[in-house]
Image: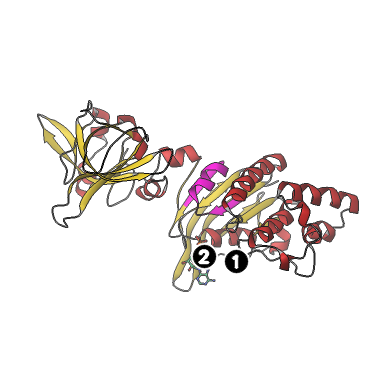
Amino acid sequence: MANIKLENVVKRYGDVVAVKDFNLEIEDKEFVVFLGPSGCGKTTTLRLIAGLENPEEGNIFIDGERVNDLSPADRDIAFVFQFYALYPHLNVYDNIAFPLKAVKVSKPEIDTHVKRVAEILQISDMLNRKPSVLSGGEMQRVALGRAMVRQPKVYLLDEPMANLDAKIRVDTRAEIKRLQHEIGATTIFVTHDQVEAMSLADRIAVIHLGVLQQIGTPDEIYNKPQSLFVAGFMGMPTMNLLDAELVAKEGTSVLRLRHTDIHLQLSPERQSGITSTTQENGLVFGIRPEHITAASQPTEQKISAQVHLIEPLGAVNILDLFLGTHAETQDPILLRVRAHPTFQVAVGDTIWLDFDAAEMHLFDRETEQTIW
Ligand code: ATP
């Protein structure tokens, strides 16, 4: 098994810098998910580790060995792509068995391994079929099976479940996690699906514009975002992010959400985090929809808002609340709140809110870094 280290890695395609000064250490047996929007450099970073691309700068180590000059075949890696390539002339059984045959594993052993992964991936009844008669999702599972049947140092999985339907995706996700723990192989999994990332990862690496934004446990990424980008990327719906300013009110400093009547009391510790520089750069206040309590009667903080839209999602209702109008653009300032479906409201109603003080975030607009 193996640890992986990327040291100041840079990859350019002409003028595009796909991977910028990337530093990352992945521990032996760790399951790391690369998460980020389309085009952020996830696949390129994976291909650099696999040896399918060469970095312009920096070093890549697997198990302490610098592998920049090693071919993909010499890196002992199993790679599953979003766009799988199966051998069309081989049936499913032989496609899965292929990597084991190549290293001359005995027939009975091959049989045991192939049948085991086929069962996990629910393709046991397709072992005699050729790829041409399989659906996209079935082909994807065969490609996964071919990687799972081996025991390489490292698994690199690039959106391997993109073509699976929702139910099989959830089942396969659970199986991948279980299998990874069982085999204990270092795994990097690329996705732009944050639920997939949260549920699979020991640590998530959030990437944006070729830059590693933050690496941490799912809990750290979700609850302690280190930048405005990470805060705004995670969560469904995402964190409310509103322009704010520190103002004096009744002899103390309070945080005012701009273009609204909302003034938030701050602890001395939170106040001291705001320097004159960050104030000049601009402040962005953040709070997740689940950290706001809505009520039909005035709450302790007595923050009022008008219901603008109700999105019923079954287990929860998402309420879009109107807080005010932007003075220059005339755009509405909206806040999203998660409410239990038993909380009866109608569009146009005035409701009352409490913000959970422990769950409030503040960011510097210019540097996009977290203040608290
Ligand atoms: P997606 O989720 O859409 O697969 P990604 O995060 O995996 O995206 P990459 O495929 O790594 O992103 O691409 C990163 C950047 O590099 C993009 O701007 C992309 O257009 C560019 N890029 C990737 N491969 C090449 C190439 N072979 N030639 C030129 N540009 C490329």
Can you tell which mark lies on residue 208? none
Magenta-tinted stretch: 188-206
Position in image of residue 272 (x %, y %): 24, 33
Q: Which quarter shows the C terminus?
A: top left
Is 98 situated above or below 363?
Answer: below
> Is residue 82 among what the camera can see?
yes
Is label 1 in contact with label 2 (beta carbons under 8 Å)?
yes
Of 246 and 115, which appears nearest the observer? 115
Q: Is residue 110 magenta?
A: no
Residue type at numbered disc 2: Lys
Q: CA distance from mark 1 to mark 2?
A: 8 Å
Q: Is residue 195 magenta?
A: yes
Bin the neighbour count of mark 1 within 10 Å (Cα to Cα): few under 14, some 14-19, many 20 and up: some
Q: Which residue is at a point 68% across and 58% down the rendered structure image?
A: 138
> Is residue 201 among what the camera can see?
no
Which residue is tagged 1?
Answer: 53
Position in image of residue 232 (x %, y %): 37, 48
Is 84 situated above or below 296?
Answer: below
Of 145 and 123, which appears nearest the observer? 123
Q: Is mark 2 within 8 Å of ligand 1?
A: yes
Colour theme: secondary structure
Which residue is tagged 2?
Answer: 11
